[in-house]
Image (spheres, rainbow, N blue to C red):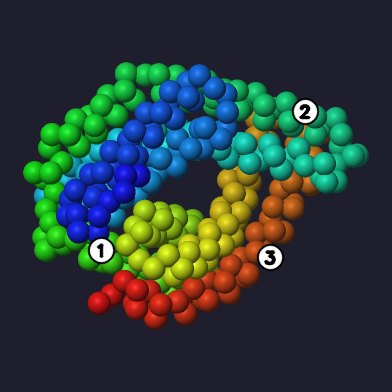
Amino acid sequence: MKKISQKESAVFVLRNIFEDLLSDIYAYRERVLKEDDNEVLHQLRISVRRSVVLMGEFSFIDRNGKLLEHRKALKTLISISNTKRDLDVLYGWVSNPNTEASYYNEALILLKKRLEEMLQKEHTAIINCLQSQTSTDILKSWKVYLSHNYQTNIANDGYDGMEKLANKVIFRRFVKIKKKINILDRKSKGMEEILHALRISFKKLRYLLETFGYLYRKKKIHKLLKEMKEFQNILGAFHDSYQQQMILEALIQNEKDGRLRVFITTTFLSDLKKYQKKEIMKIQKQLKKFLKKEKIYKKLFVY
């Protein structure tokens, strides 16, 4: 990102950030079309996701709702690769040499084959989508908006400097996380949905801290980011387990080979459910620790 003075208006700063991210999206899109590299696809997803998060977090200063319209369009560029990302994680897990599956060796080989076929299908779908006129139009429309209409639609509303606006958005995200954690304490069912929402909310807070960290003391922000990544890792692993469970259960429904169905059920699904039951209690304890950070967030981001 370009070096930005703290005295620049929030409108100017946000447009620079959006333009830099759009430039990254174009660059990674071109590379994905030329290279079969999961890391490049991952970077494309991050660039799009950062854009989508900022468009949502700052939508309240948009006079006519155009940010949310472009946000909705850009989100499709993330959703096209969600399944492949989940399959990659699952494939890495079943390929782990520590997997105790020697008795089911033939079934394991067959499972990996099925996943490879699914991965190839998803890769083709991603390439087709990124090459499509629809994707081209989504990016072009966002680029034109930033160049010609953005500044007249975004209002400063008293936030002349970026720091004041960033303070409001960052602390507001903290409060939303706090509310979700408190809801989690009162729930006995549907906890995975709340944890999924919390995972996304922590990711949004992390992106905000990373994007606007230059406005604050580096040491303080670095500590908050380190804590944020730890929470994201815990919640991310738990979410992955549910995605893997869904993929495997769908696979069983369509699989004709009885050995593979038994193998998936007795080995992988059994392990996933044990992990989830054990991990959910650990996560709740960890999240309560986050609530103790409220004084720090107030001191940093509330005047």
Q: Residue 134: x and y, percent?
A: 31, 23
Q: Secondary structure at mark 2?
A: helix
Residue holding disc 3? 278
The N terminus sits in image quarter: top left
Residue holding disc 1? 163
Evaluate whether residue 149 shows in this view: yes
Tell me the residue at 81%/32% (across/down).
107
The one of 44 and 116 positioned closer to us in this rendering: 44
Mark 2 closeness class: few <14, some 14–19, many ≥20 residues within 10 Å: some
Residue type, label 1: Glu
* Quarter of the view holding residue 231: bottom right
Quick check: 99 above or below 58?
A: above
Question: For this view, does 103 lie left or right of residue 7?
Answer: right
Residue type, label 2: Leu
The one of 278 and 143 positioned closer to us in this rendering: 143
- Between disc 1 and disc 3, the foreground one is 1
Q: Residue 214: x and y, percent?
A: 36, 59
Quick check: 167 above or below 92?
A: below
Question: For this view, does 113 lie left or right of residue 205?
Answer: right
Residue type, label 3: Lys
Query: Tag 3 or tag 2, which sits nearer the N-term?
Result: 2
The C terminus sits in image quarter: bottom left
Query: Tag 1 or tag 2, which sits nearer the N-term?
Result: 2
Q: CA distance from mark 2 to mark 1?
A: 55 Å
| Mark drawn on residue 110 | 2
Query: Tag 3 or tag 1, which sits nearer the N-term?
Result: 1
Tell me the residue at 58%/40% (across/down).
86
Q: CA distance from mark 2 to mark 3?
A: 30 Å
